[in-house]
Image (spheres, grey):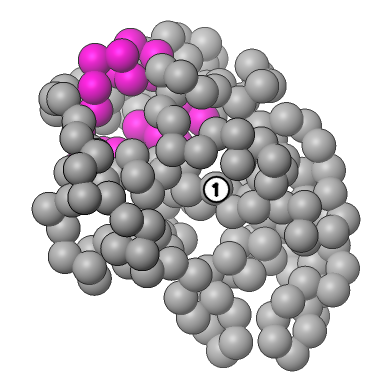
Amino acid sequence: MASPASASPPGIPSKATAQSNLNALTVAAESGAGYNRDLFPHWITISGSCNTRETVLRRDGSGVSVDSACYPTSGSWYSPYDGATWTNPADVDIDHIVPLAEAWRSGANGWTTARRQSFANDLSGPQLIAVTDEVNQGKGDQDPSTWKPSRTAYHCTYAKMWIRTKYNWSLRLQTSEKTALQSMLNTCAS
């Protein structure tokens, strides 16, 4: 079953909206005490046999066909972080734009498990995107003050997605993170 690719998460705001969202975010120190990835149940079943990861692979890929278990059997995926295109789904990770550990440090430590599950599987906003696996692993749980996509042409979009996700989920940010986001947002034409 082939699916058209939007190749982009939903809900990416305009520059003006992202600026307004950034201005509204609370700046505060972060603490990672008590973080455990298992506190964010992820890759839950979305529809039929398709989990969140497989749903994003279908959304972000081109010419994607899946088997009865919803695993991609063909297709290609373009990673906007590094400009690489992959035809093996094993070479693609689904990145949490705002990493789970970063969310924990920014306020998710006070959430219920159900809310953390919703965040980890958020298909309604720009929180999940298919990217090159090694690039995602290199990003780890870093925020934009210490990690940015290697393609500078994507910095604007990345900043808008990060800001929107933090805003949608009422997460805090640190001063260095806000400075980096503002710098990236300043590269946006619109």
- Quarter of the image for residue 40 reads bottom left
Residue at the spot 29% in from the left edge and 63% down from the top edge = 39
Residue at the spot 30% in from the left edge and 44% down from the top edge = 103
Q: Callout 1: 10 Å neighbours few (<14), some, many (20+)?
A: many
Q: Position of residue 69 (x, y in %)?
A: 70, 87
Is residue 24 visible from the viewing direction of this image? Answer: no
Residue at the spot 20% in from the left edge and 43% down from the top edge = 33
Q: Which residue is mark 1?
A: 95
- State which region is magenta: 158-181
Left or right, 107 with reference to 40: left
Give the number of marks.
1
Say what amino acid the circle numbered 1 marks: Asp
Q: Position of residue 74 (x, y in %)?
A: 87, 68
Magenta segment's dominant SS is helix
- Quarter of the image for residue 94 reads bottom right
Left or right, 180 with reference to 93: left
Is 103 placed above or below 111 here?
above
Q: Position of residue 126 (x, y in %)?
A: 46, 46
- Quarter of the image for residue 81 reads top right
Q: Secondary structure at mark 1?
A: strand
Is 17 placed above or below 182 here?
below
Is residue 178 visible from the viewing direction of this image? Answer: yes
Left or right, 26 with reference to 21: left
